Amino acid sequence: MKELTVISGKGGTGKTSVTGSFAVLAEKHVLADCDVDAANLHLILNPQVQHRESFPGMPMVEIITEKCTGCGLCEQLCRYGAIKDGAVDEMSCERCLVCYHACPEKAVQLVDNVAGEWFISHTRYGPMVHARLGIAQENSGKLVTEVRRRARTLAEEQGKNLIITDGPPGIGCPVISALGGSDLALVVVEPTLSSIHDLFRVLELTEHFKVQTAVCINKWDINPDNTREVENICHNKKVTLAGRLRYDPAVVAAAMEGKPVIRLPSTVAGDIVSLWDCVRQELGV
Protein backbone atom coordinates (compact mmCIF):
# COMPACT_ATOMS: atom_id res chain seq x y z
CA MET A 1 0.00 0.00 0.00
CA LYS A 2 1.29 3.46 -0.94
CA GLU A 3 0.36 6.82 0.56
CA LEU A 4 0.46 10.13 -1.31
CA THR A 5 0.24 13.29 0.78
CA VAL A 6 -0.51 16.59 -0.96
CA ILE A 7 0.78 19.57 1.03
CA SER A 8 1.72 23.21 0.59
CA GLY A 9 3.79 25.79 2.40
CA LYS A 10 0.83 28.16 2.61
CA GLY A 11 -2.91 27.95 2.28
CA GLY A 12 -4.75 28.64 -0.96
CA THR A 13 -2.23 27.19 -3.42
CA GLY A 14 -4.73 24.71 -4.87
CA LYS A 15 -3.78 21.46 -3.16
CA THR A 16 -7.41 20.50 -2.47
CA SER A 17 -8.34 21.03 -6.14
CA VAL A 18 -5.41 18.82 -7.12
CA THR A 19 -6.37 16.16 -4.56
CA GLY A 20 -10.00 16.17 -5.72
CA SER A 21 -8.93 15.63 -9.32
CA PHE A 22 -6.59 12.81 -8.28
CA ALA A 23 -9.59 11.18 -6.60
CA VAL A 24 -11.29 11.03 -10.00
CA LEU A 25 -8.25 9.71 -11.85
CA ALA A 26 -7.02 7.13 -9.32
CA GLU A 27 -8.25 3.57 -8.88
CA LYS A 28 -8.49 1.32 -5.80
CA HIS A 29 -7.83 4.12 -3.35
CA VAL A 30 -9.02 5.65 -0.09
CA LEU A 31 -9.19 9.41 0.42
CA ALA A 32 -8.17 11.18 3.62
CA ASP A 33 -8.67 14.85 4.41
CA CYS A 34 -6.06 15.69 7.04
CA ASP A 35 -6.54 19.46 6.89
CA VAL A 36 -8.70 19.14 9.99
CA ASP A 37 -8.38 22.80 11.04
CA ALA A 38 -9.99 23.96 7.78
CA ALA A 39 -11.27 20.85 5.99
CA ASN A 40 -12.73 21.54 2.54
CA LEU A 41 -12.19 18.43 0.42
CA HIS A 42 -15.78 17.48 1.23
CA LEU A 43 -16.97 20.60 -0.59
CA ILE A 44 -16.02 19.16 -3.98
CA LEU A 45 -16.53 15.44 -3.29
CA ASN A 46 -19.95 15.61 -1.56
CA PRO A 47 -19.39 12.70 0.86
CA GLN A 48 -22.28 10.77 2.39
CA VAL A 49 -21.41 10.10 6.04
CA GLN A 50 -21.71 6.44 6.99
CA HIS A 51 -19.95 6.45 10.36
CA ARG A 52 -18.95 9.14 12.83
CA GLU A 53 -17.19 9.22 16.18
CA SER A 54 -16.23 11.90 18.66
CA PHE A 55 -12.59 12.86 19.14
CA PRO A 56 -11.56 13.54 22.75
CA GLY A 57 -9.36 16.56 23.34
CA MET A 58 -7.40 17.79 26.32
CA PRO A 59 -9.65 17.79 29.42
CA MET A 60 -11.14 21.04 30.61
CA VAL A 61 -10.75 22.20 34.21
CA GLU A 62 -13.59 23.30 36.45
CA ILE A 63 -13.51 24.69 39.96
CA ILE A 64 -15.87 23.06 42.47
CA THR A 65 -17.35 25.99 44.38
CA GLU A 66 -18.22 23.91 47.45
CA LYS A 67 -14.58 22.85 47.93
CA CYS A 68 -12.90 26.13 47.00
CA THR A 69 -11.69 28.21 49.96
CA GLY A 70 -10.81 31.23 47.83
CA CYS A 71 -7.08 31.08 48.60
CA GLY A 72 -6.27 32.44 45.11
CA LEU A 73 -3.34 30.08 44.54
CA CYS A 74 -4.70 28.84 41.20
CA GLU A 75 -5.23 32.41 39.98
CA GLN A 76 -1.71 33.30 41.07
CA LEU A 77 -0.11 30.33 39.31
CA CYS A 78 -2.07 30.57 36.05
CA ARG A 79 0.26 32.16 33.50
CA TYR A 80 -2.56 32.67 31.00
CA GLY A 81 -4.92 34.71 33.16
CA ALA A 82 -7.63 32.09 32.69
CA ILE A 83 -8.79 32.03 36.33
CA LYS A 84 -10.51 34.93 37.98
CA ASP A 85 -12.77 35.08 41.02
CA GLY A 86 -12.93 31.30 41.28
CA ALA A 87 -14.02 30.71 37.67
CA VAL A 88 -12.16 29.37 34.63
CA ASP A 89 -12.32 31.15 31.27
CA GLU A 90 -12.42 28.26 28.78
CA MET A 91 -11.19 30.39 25.88
CA SER A 92 -8.07 31.50 27.77
CA CYS A 93 -7.28 28.16 29.44
CA GLU A 94 -4.36 26.26 27.86
CA ARG A 95 -5.07 22.96 29.70
CA CYS A 96 -1.65 22.97 31.37
CA LEU A 97 -3.31 21.55 34.55
CA VAL A 98 -1.07 23.52 36.92
CA CYS A 99 -4.15 24.59 38.88
CA TYR A 100 -5.37 21.01 39.08
CA HIS A 101 -2.13 19.73 40.61
CA ALA A 102 -1.51 22.78 42.83
CA CYS A 103 -4.90 23.20 44.51
CA PRO A 104 -4.48 22.26 48.20
CA GLU A 105 -8.22 21.56 48.57
CA LYS A 106 -8.53 19.44 45.41
CA ALA A 107 -11.22 21.87 44.29
CA VAL A 108 -10.19 21.73 40.62
CA GLN A 109 -11.63 18.81 38.69
CA LEU A 110 -11.08 17.56 35.14
CA VAL A 111 -13.99 17.57 32.72
CA ASP A 112 -14.10 15.50 29.54
CA ASN A 113 -13.83 17.59 26.40
CA VAL A 114 -14.97 16.67 22.89
CA ALA A 115 -12.57 18.43 20.52
CA GLY A 116 -14.12 17.30 17.24
CA GLU A 117 -15.45 14.45 15.15
CA TRP A 118 -14.08 12.11 12.50
CA PHE A 119 -16.10 10.48 9.75
CA ILE A 120 -16.01 7.60 7.31
CA SER A 121 -17.97 8.57 4.22
CA HIS A 122 -18.86 7.34 0.76
CA THR A 123 -18.14 9.42 -2.35
CA ARG A 124 -18.63 8.58 -6.00
CA TYR A 125 -14.83 8.58 -6.26
CA GLY A 126 -14.14 6.18 -3.40
CA PRO A 127 -14.33 5.95 0.40
CA MET A 128 -13.18 8.95 2.38
CA VAL A 129 -12.04 9.55 5.95
CA HIS A 130 -12.28 13.13 7.17
CA ALA A 131 -12.74 15.13 10.35
CA ARG A 132 -13.94 18.37 11.83
CA LEU A 133 -12.15 20.12 14.67
CA GLY A 134 -14.24 22.18 17.08
CA ILE A 135 -13.89 25.94 17.41
CA ALA A 136 -10.78 26.97 19.39
CA GLN A 137 -9.86 23.31 19.95
CA GLU A 138 -6.32 21.99 19.82
CA ASN A 139 -4.65 18.59 19.35
CA SER A 140 -5.13 18.84 15.58
CA GLY A 141 -1.96 16.77 15.15
CA LYS A 142 -3.53 13.90 17.08
CA LEU A 143 -6.72 14.18 15.03
CA VAL A 144 -4.66 14.03 11.82
CA THR A 145 -2.99 10.86 13.12
CA GLU A 146 -6.41 9.37 13.88
CA VAL A 147 -7.71 10.17 10.38
CA ARG A 148 -4.64 8.56 8.79
CA ARG A 149 -4.93 5.49 11.00
CA ARG A 150 -8.58 5.03 10.11
CA ALA A 151 -7.86 5.54 6.40
CA ARG A 152 -5.17 2.86 6.46
CA THR A 153 -7.44 0.44 8.31
CA LEU A 154 -10.21 1.09 5.80
CA ALA A 155 -7.84 0.55 2.88
CA GLU A 156 -6.68 -2.77 4.33
CA GLU A 157 -10.25 -3.92 4.91
CA GLN A 158 -11.34 -3.05 1.36
CA GLY A 159 -8.18 -4.20 -0.40
CA LYS A 160 -7.13 -0.75 -1.63
CA ASN A 161 -3.50 -0.14 -2.59
CA LEU A 162 -3.36 3.66 -2.40
CA ILE A 163 -4.22 6.38 0.12
CA ILE A 164 -4.53 9.92 -1.22
CA THR A 165 -4.24 12.47 1.58
CA ASP A 166 -5.13 16.15 1.41
CA GLY A 167 -2.65 17.47 3.94
CA PRO A 168 -2.59 20.69 5.98
CA PRO A 169 -0.62 23.76 4.89
CA GLY A 170 2.50 25.01 6.63
CA ILE A 171 5.17 23.16 8.59
CA GLY A 172 3.56 22.73 12.03
CA CYS A 173 2.43 19.74 14.06
CA PRO A 174 -0.50 18.76 11.76
CA VAL A 175 1.83 18.66 8.74
CA ILE A 176 4.36 16.54 10.58
CA SER A 177 1.57 14.16 11.60
CA ALA A 178 0.38 13.96 7.98
CA LEU A 179 3.85 13.37 6.53
CA GLY A 180 5.18 10.63 8.80
CA GLY A 181 5.31 7.35 6.92
CA SER A 182 4.10 8.82 3.61
CA ASP A 183 5.62 7.35 0.45
CA LEU A 184 5.47 10.63 -1.50
CA ALA A 185 4.80 14.26 -0.58
CA LEU A 186 3.51 16.39 -3.44
CA VAL A 187 4.10 20.07 -2.67
CA VAL A 188 1.78 22.45 -4.51
CA VAL A 189 3.38 25.87 -4.96
CA GLU A 190 2.38 29.07 -6.72
CA PRO A 191 4.85 31.34 -8.56
CA THR A 192 4.62 34.06 -5.91
CA LEU A 193 7.29 35.31 -3.54
CA SER A 194 5.44 34.19 -0.40
CA SER A 195 4.78 30.71 -1.79
CA ILE A 196 8.41 30.35 -2.92
CA HIS A 197 9.60 31.40 0.53
CA ASP A 198 7.39 28.75 2.15
CA LEU A 199 8.54 26.15 -0.38
CA PHE A 200 12.03 26.29 1.14
CA ARG A 201 10.60 25.56 4.60
CA VAL A 202 8.50 22.64 3.37
CA LEU A 203 11.42 21.08 1.49
CA GLU A 204 13.56 21.35 4.63
CA LEU A 205 10.78 19.56 6.53
CA THR A 206 10.40 16.70 4.06
CA GLU A 207 14.19 16.35 3.84
CA HIS A 208 14.42 16.17 7.64
CA PHE A 209 11.86 13.37 7.78
CA LYS A 210 13.34 11.67 4.71
CA VAL A 211 10.07 11.74 2.74
CA GLN A 212 10.36 11.47 -1.03
CA THR A 213 9.15 14.77 -2.47
CA ALA A 214 7.84 16.13 -5.75
CA VAL A 215 6.68 19.65 -6.64
CA CYS A 216 3.74 20.90 -8.68
CA ILE A 217 3.63 24.54 -9.84
CA ASN A 218 0.05 25.77 -9.93
CA LYS A 219 -0.86 28.76 -12.14
CA TRP A 220 2.65 28.75 -13.51
CA ASP A 221 1.78 31.15 -16.33
CA ILE A 222 0.85 34.09 -14.09
CA ASN A 223 4.56 34.75 -13.47
CA PRO A 224 6.99 32.80 -15.71
CA ASP A 225 10.02 34.37 -14.01
CA ASN A 226 9.02 33.06 -10.59
CA THR A 227 8.15 29.72 -12.19
CA ARG A 228 11.73 29.45 -13.42
CA GLU A 229 12.88 30.27 -9.88
CA VAL A 230 10.85 27.32 -8.54
CA GLU A 231 12.27 25.07 -11.26
CA ASN A 232 15.80 26.13 -10.28
CA ILE A 233 15.06 25.35 -6.63
CA CYS A 234 13.85 21.87 -7.58
CA HIS A 235 16.94 21.31 -9.73
CA ASN A 236 19.36 22.46 -7.02
CA LYS A 237 17.68 20.36 -4.33
CA LYS A 238 17.27 17.36 -6.67
CA VAL A 239 13.50 17.36 -6.18
CA THR A 240 11.26 16.04 -8.96
CA LEU A 241 9.19 18.68 -10.75
CA ALA A 242 6.06 16.60 -11.30
CA GLY A 243 4.06 19.08 -13.32
CA ARG A 244 2.94 22.61 -14.12
CA LEU A 245 -0.72 23.63 -14.07
CA ARG A 246 -1.82 26.68 -16.04
CA TYR A 247 -4.26 29.27 -14.70
CA ASP A 248 -7.82 28.37 -15.59
CA PRO A 249 -11.06 30.05 -14.37
CA ALA A 250 -12.67 26.59 -14.57
CA VAL A 251 -11.04 25.74 -11.23
CA VAL A 252 -13.14 28.38 -9.46
CA ALA A 253 -16.22 27.41 -11.47
CA ALA A 254 -15.77 23.77 -10.45
CA ALA A 255 -15.45 24.71 -6.77
CA MET A 256 -18.66 26.76 -6.99
CA GLU A 257 -20.44 23.74 -8.51
CA GLY A 258 -19.00 21.41 -5.87
CA LYS A 259 -17.10 19.26 -8.37
CA PRO A 260 -13.46 18.34 -9.03
CA VAL A 261 -12.15 20.52 -11.85
CA ILE A 262 -11.20 17.43 -13.86
CA ARG A 263 -14.95 16.79 -14.28
CA LEU A 264 -15.48 20.04 -16.21
CA PRO A 265 -14.27 21.00 -19.71
CA SER A 266 -11.09 22.98 -19.07
CA THR A 267 -7.64 23.71 -20.43
CA VAL A 268 -6.03 22.65 -17.15
CA ALA A 269 -7.48 19.11 -17.29
CA GLY A 270 -4.67 17.87 -19.54
CA ASP A 271 -2.08 19.35 -17.17
CA ILE A 272 -3.66 17.51 -14.23
CA VAL A 273 -3.66 14.21 -16.12
CA SER A 274 0.05 14.65 -16.94
CA LEU A 275 0.73 15.52 -13.30
CA TRP A 276 -1.07 12.38 -12.14
CA ASP A 277 0.90 10.22 -14.59
CA CYS A 278 4.16 11.57 -13.15
CA VAL A 279 2.96 11.08 -9.55
CA ARG A 280 1.99 7.48 -10.34
CA GLN A 281 5.47 6.82 -11.69
CA GLU A 282 7.05 8.31 -8.58
CA LEU A 283 4.82 6.16 -6.36
CA GLY A 284 5.18 3.03 -8.45
CA VAL A 285 1.44 2.31 -8.65
Image (spheres, rainbow, N blue to C red):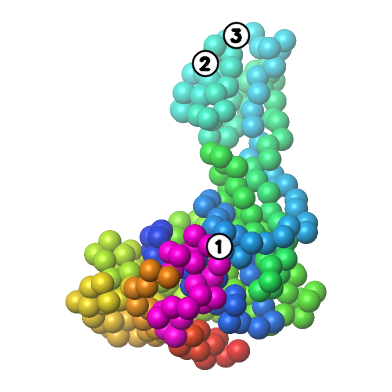
Task: Give the number of the mark in front: 3 or 2.
Answer: 2
Q: Secondary structure at mark 2?
A: strand
Image coordinates for residue 264, horizontal then vertical, percent: 51, 75
Residue where numbered disc 3 is placed: 70
The residue sitting at 78% across, 56% down in the picture is: 51
Q: Which range is magenta?
A: 251-272
Q: Residue furthest right?
A: 157
Task: Quadrant for residue 124, please give it.
Answer: bottom right
The residue sitting at 57% across, 28% down in the picture is: 90
The residue sitting at 77% across, 80% down in the picture is: 159
Relative to 201, is 251 on the left or the right? Answer: right
Work out whether 55 lies above or below 250: above
Work out whether 274 lies above or below 138: below
Residue where numbered disc 2 is placed: 84
Q: How many marks?
A: 3
Q: Amino acid at mark 3?
A: Gly
Classify 10 Å Cα crowding around label 1: few (below 14), some (14-19), many (20 and above).
some
Relative to 31, is 74 on the left or the right? Answer: left
